[in-house]
Image: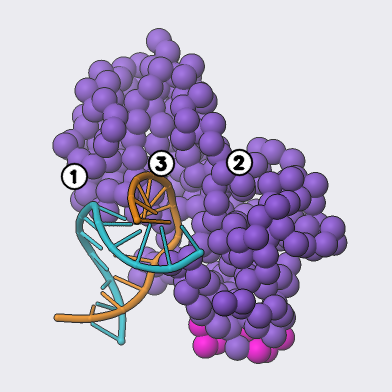
Chain colours: A purple, B cyan, C orange
Amino acid sequence: MPELPEVEIARRNLEHWLQGTAVTAAQADRTRVFRGADRSAFERLRGRLAFSRRRGKTLLLGFEGNQGFLSHLGMTGKWVCRAAGQGEPYSRARLVLANGTVLHYRDPRQFGRIHPAPADALEHLPDVRRLGVDPLLDRLDARALKAVFGTSRAPLKVALLDQARVAGLGNIHAAEALWRSKLSPFRPAGALTDAEWRRLATAIKASIRFALSRETDEEIAYVEEPGTPNPFRVYGRAGKRCFRCRGTVHRVRQGGRSTYFCPRCQPGRRKS
DNA sequence: TGACCCCTGGCC
DNA sequence: GGCCAGGGGTCA
């Protein structure tokens, strides 16, 4: 369940693994991962990486000869590097490399997506054009937030998950950013003061940079994996003490997903 | 905006 | 067995 930081790490990993080598074969299983796409185009992929880019949670990989594909990790997608001949559970697609390794796209739930397209067309795919401001690539400040949320009456938390506004936030970092900025998840998105926009912009970047600084391993550790301690300030901490005010962290259902927040330091009632 | 769907695994 | 899950899409 990768959000922006995990996807950025995945991009760096792929770039690292593909550096100085080339794809000699590509395999794509019959899987939902290729829904709406030309699976055989992925299987024809050969040669060296030309570029790796990320926009929000979407990865764009370009190869020589104007080949390429889009990769979205969904909730359980992950790229891993294995020795040739070594199996990988839930592997859905593979890039066989000249250096004797294999890059597996592993995805138990198949909510992720691989979409082959010419390298020069990747940025122009509708799924990429639709994405909003990226906290790492674009200037994310009070003015930018005001521009994307300015008229929205949706609750802040729900609006933050809209990839067409801010690209890359998921359920975790939306909650983390609101906690850091002391803003209620129920506040109407378009009704913040300039000072609050500034706080939110700072908090979004801080939350993402913090997560990015922790992710140094080749293999991304998701919080759900056993043995991984919860590094977050509010996410997954329902019933526990707020780190800031010692109040109690609450969990509510909002827009079909869990929202974690501290009612004491993120004041603002749910309107219903 | 909410409800439901896509999938599978882990936890209680 | 039921509930939960950080992704997104579609429908009314």
User: To which residue does mark 2 refer?
Assistant: A132
Q: How far apart are marks 3 and 1 (CA)?
A: 22 Å
| Disc 3 versus disc 2: nearer the observer | 2
The kind of secondary structure element at disc 3 is strand
- Label 3, on which residue? A72
- Nearer to me, A204 or A229: A204
Task: Choose top left, top right, bottom left or bottom right for residue A210.
Answer: bottom right
Callout 2 secondary element: loop
**CA separation in Å, label 3 and label 2:** 16 Å
Type of the residue with mark 2: Gly
Residue A158's tag is none
x, y percent for residue A124: 51, 24
* Residue lying farthest to the top in this orientation: A65
- In this view, A192 is above or below C10: below
Image vertical order of residue A117 relative to residue B10, above or below:
above
- Disc nearer the start of the sequence (1/2): 1
Q: What residue type is labelled 1?
A: Gly
- Answer left or right for C11 relative to A194: left
Pointer 3 indicates a residue of which chain? A
How many numbered marks have been drawn onto this rendered protein structure?
3
Give residue A87's mark. Answer: 1
